[in-house]
Amino acid sequence: MCEILDLNHNRLGYTLDLTCQGVRLIIAKSASVEKTMNLIIKPPRIAKIEPIKVQIEQKWYQEKDDQFAQIGGIFIQVDNPKNLELLLNYFDNIADYRVILSSLDQVVKMLS
């Protein structure tokens, strides 16, 4: 999960899903939402990847409750595609690691 900031570095929300084509966000309903948005994806510090400026085109908007909404959008522009690729690889590696740990945990339970 990454923080999502506006260009003034104000937190708008977080990523829920991230691909090379686009992003799914959860944001406060009070945030200004446009058809085209310029955002900063701020990776977790542990990833050691610089923030990535993106422009997205909103494809859908869904209110989740009285405070939050989800937005799905495609990338129109990415200022540093290499950093986006590094970030996607970082999350893929974490997912692989969690699958391995889960499998090892199941083996330990079977052997106990």
Image: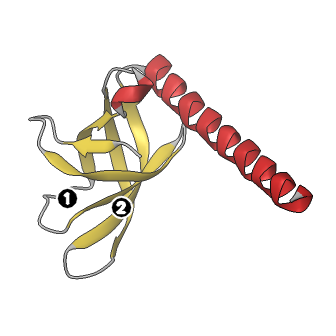
Check contact, mark 2 vs mark 1: CB within 8 A: yes
Which image quadrant for residue 41? top left
* 61 left or right of 47 in image: left
The answer to whether residue 89 is above or below residue 108 is above
Q: Which residue is mark 1?
A: 33
Find numbered disc 1 in the image and state the secondary structure of the residue it sits on: loop
Which kind of residue does numbered mark 1 sit on? Answer: Val
Q: Which mark is residue 2?
A: none
Please tell me which residue is depicted at 82% across the width and 53% down the height of the picture. 108
Residue 71 is tagged as 2
- List x then y, in percent, for residue 81: 46, 22
- Identify which residue is drawn at 13% across, 58% down: 32
Is residue 87 shown left or right of residue 53? Answer: right
Q: Nearer the viewer, residue 14 or 34?
A: 14
Q: Nearer the viewer, residue 55 or 28?
A: 28
Counting from the top left corner in percent of width and height, residue 92 is at: 62, 37
> At numbered mark 2, what does the secondary structure look like: helix, strand or loop?
strand
Q: Is 101 rendered above or below residue 32? A: above
Task: State the residue lying farthest toward the right.
Answer: 111
